[in-house]
Amino acid sequence: MSSTIIPFGPQHPVLPEPLHIKLVMEDEKIIEAIPAIGYVHRGLEKLTETKDFTQNVFIVERVCGICSVMHAMAYCQGIEELMNIEIPDRAKFLRVIWAELHRIHSHLLWLGLLADAFGFESLFMQVWRDREKVMDIMEETAGARVVISANAIGGTRRDLSKEQMIKINLTIDEIKQDLEQVEAVFLNNYTVKHRLVGRGILTKADAIELCTVGPMARASGISMDLRTTGYSAYGQLDFEPVLHNDGDNFARTYVRLKEVYQSIDLIKQAIAKIPEGEHVVPVKGNPPKGEVISRVEQPRGEVLYYLRANGTKNLERLRLRTPTFANIPSLMKMLPGSQLADVPLLILTIDPCISCTER
Amino acid sequence: MFKMMVNVFKNLFSKPATRMYPFVKREPFADSRGHIEGCDIDKCIFCGICQRKCPADAIIVNKAEKSWEIDQFRCVICNACVDTCPKKCIISSPTHKTSQYTKNTLKIVQAEKPTEGAGQDA
């Protein structure tokens, strides 16, 4: 049978960002998928070489809005390792609190987009209403909604007061309550399950071979969560990675949904255990000659920063590998064999962040 | 499904979660980073630290002219200048800047002082 090529994207209702995939079809069935990225390349890696190392914190935050805290965290951890700075314990806990708040809002955004993609508009609004509460906490505590610029080299830029922590505790309780009400719809609803169960299966063997990261890998049964390595204050908190063994759309939804609860629990633990003290230490001098690799778990998976300094205030090289970039090969594995109508959902379940990927 | 029904009834009888925006506005949070309003030019010593720390190159400080200039369209509102200013003379406002017809920079020049007063840093 002759095949047809259908272009998917760069502009498509399900994608907020430009990703282009050529779908080679036989009837309604996909036999091959050819990706093309490069529509939003901004040259941020090159830009970091021209700015000084403290300014770079603001640049790496803008690689990706929705995981901005984790980008800055990975960069700051790298520079701190390079310069041998021991940051205060309070700063580590503050970083964890903001990072987990970011994870909640990223996963809630994704759950909303998923509901929108399978045409359940009211569920979409329910989830986003809760997300707005997290955004308000961000603005109140850090000064901005998305790119919050809370991290600085040597600690954090702001501290949380007692009242703010109480308010965070109350708000995440509310979110937990609201989410428990809609959880059943994501996990038990007949129509929703029809769109999710058994679609886009990524087996554990494939996931290992294609170096899948983050919730994608955990949905395929790989127990891989970088937070378990105990960077920042995660070593002092108690948690287990959320796992599912099916590797289909439903498994990925399950993992992300349960991770919201996990983040809520982590924030509560962090607020209970946070020590008193300084939240930032002064930084003197330039990073010495050397190179370092820093890894952090983002909502979408593992981000890897490679930093090379040459003793001046500018870095010689900054290379970053974002989770979506690592997950695109898995998407290309999932697409062949599926129906055209499932393509938007399949692309969405890797939680694509194209601006991240192209930097 | 029952849990969702509770939610449905709650939504039916509760107030909307959104505001009628142009008519009802939420007060900005006190420490929110809205925009850089300007500079208290009488306190400024024209050291240029804000210009060097700005990641977006939005600030130009001219010591000879005694002027402080910001391009608010380049500014990324990170408040690095506010944090590093030794005299704390840069004013950050929690409200957001509305859209503009023209893209002008904001230039503030220190007025000539008739007498050589104290407090003039060299």
Image (spheres, coloured by chain):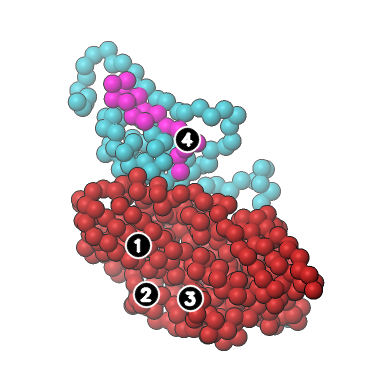
Chain colours: A red, B cyan
Q: Mark 4, chain letter?
A: B
Badge 4 marks a residue whose secondary structure is loop
Instruction: For marks 2 and 4, give the CA distance.
Output: 39 Å
Residue at point 44%, 75% (across, down): A266
Locate residue A200 relative to residue A221 in the image: left or right: right
Q: Position of residue A292 (x, y in %)?
A: 29, 64
Residue that carries the numbered disc 2 in the rendered image? A234
Regarding residue A299, the answer to whether it shows in the image is no
Quadrant, the C terminus of chain B? top left
Amino acid found under the numbered disc labelled 1: Tyr
Q: Who is closer to the viewer here, A106 or A314? A: A314
Q: Mark 1, chain letter?
A: A
Instruction: For marks 4 and 3, give the CA distance.
Output: 43 Å
Q: Are marks 2 and 4 on the same chain?
A: no
> From the viewer's perspective, is the residue at label 3 or at label 2 nearer?
3
Boundaries of the magenta span: B60-76
Q: Is residue B69 magenta?
A: yes
Q: Are marks 1 and 3 on the same chain?
A: yes
Q: Who is closer to the viewer here, A304 or B85? A: A304
Residue that carries the numbered disc 1 in the rendered image? A306
